[in-house]
Amino acid sequence: MKKRAQAAMEFLMTYGWAILVVLVAIGALAYFGVLDPGKFLPQRCVLPSGLHCEDFVIVSGGAAVRIKNVLGYTITLDKVSLESCGVYQSPLTLINGESTAVNVPCSPALTGTKYSGQLNVTYTNTETNLQHKAQGSLRGKLE
């Protein structure tokens, strides 16, 4: 019985050390950024149906977003803001099918290599004078 217990203990110790080495290797790869899933995530700008994000660029001082109106009626962009950033607030009229670039400042400046946050757009339907709020997302690398 004693020999079987010793054999079982040696078996557990050998595989225990092997598992520990594998865990340390995975931890080192994650620490040095080799296993960072953020590197593989695509850049994207998503807005709800009716508003289309055609293009965007993110810099430390904020973001420039090109928004296209495909709602079927003329709107006035009242406010565009980014989560944890500033607000662009200067009314712009967009006819259906028209697009415009909006620069949203960020104070304090963005740090790091990537940004991911909520994109908020407030617009008014010029036919009914009703104000709407749209929430989207913006994710990408700082350039």
Image: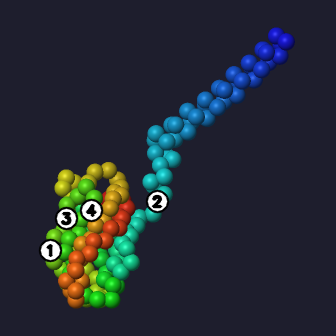
- Mark found first going from the N terminus, 4 or 2: 2
Residue 66: x %, y % from top left: 29, 76
- The residue labelled by disc 1 is 90
Mark 3: secondary structure: strand
Q: Which image quarter: residue 88?
A: bottom left
Residue 25 or residue 100, whichever sits in front? 100
Residue where numbered disc 4 is placed: 82
Residue type (three-letter) at the residue carrying disc 4 = Leu
Q: Earlier in the sequence, mark 1 or mark 2?
A: 2
Q: Is residue 27 visible?
A: yes
The kind of residue tagged 1 is Ser
Q: Residue at x 22, y 77 (%)?
A: 131
Q: Position of residue 86 (x, y in %)?
A: 20, 61
Disc nearer the start of the sequence (3/4) = 4
Q: Which residue position holds label 3?
A: 87
x 46%, y 45%: residue: 33
Q: Which mark is residue 2?
A: none
- Looking at the picture, how far across and down is residue 138, in whole percent? 35, 64
Q: Amino acid at mark 2?
A: Leu
Q: Which of pointers 2 and 3 indicates the residue nearer the eye?
A: 3
